[in-house]
Image (cartoon, grey):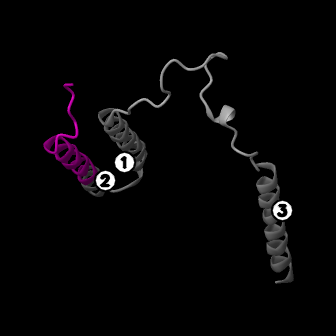
Amino acid sequence: MMLVTTTMMMCMMISLILMGLCFVISKKDKNNREKMTPFECGFDPKSSSRMPFSMQFFMIAIIFLIFDVEIVIILPTIKMMHTSNMMTWFLITTTFIMILILGLYYEWKNKIIEWAI
């Protein structure tokens, strides 16, 4: 029991020391106007560096990220097919794919997926 307590105390001390070092090292200087401006090869910028962001691009990126994660979730089901009951595997996979199709239908119905500009 004493060994577990000692180990936990050592871990806490090391963690606190590392957090303190990171806090001290990452201290930023005062915000300088020159450092906060965009840099264009030493010249003053010709236009604003703040461009309007396309919400459609953002939505497509989020949808891609969601479906990318879902593909990663689907891949282990192939390996699971060999080790589990076929009926259970079929029900789980069908349910998951139906949820994906319903989500896609919902996005399409609410015009989140608008491919035409």
Q: Amino acid at mark 2?
A: Trp
* Figure quadrant of residue 69: top left
* Figure quadrant of residue 111: top left
**Residue 23 position in % (x across, y down):** 77, 56
Name the outermost residue toward the bottom. Answer: 1
Quarter of the image that includes the N terminus: bottom right
> Mark 3: which secondary structure?
helix
User: Which residue is the site of mark 1?
Assistant: 81
Front-most of residues 30 and 22: 30
> Would you call the spot at circle 2 few (<14 residues within 10 Å), some (14-19), or many (20 or more)?
some
60 lies left or right of 23:
left
Q: Is residue 63 above or below residue 91?
A: above
Residue depicted at 21% across the width and 44% down the height: 107
Residue depicted at 84% across the width and 62% down the height: 17
The boundaries of the magenta stretch are 94-117
User: Which residue is the site of mark 3?
Assistant: 17
Residue depicted at 22% across the width and 40% down the height: 112
Residue depicted at 28% across the width and 51% down the height: 96
**Upstream in the sequence, badge 1 or badge 3?**
3
Whether label 1 touches label 2, CB < 8 Å: yes
Whether label 3 touches label 2, CB < 8 Å: no
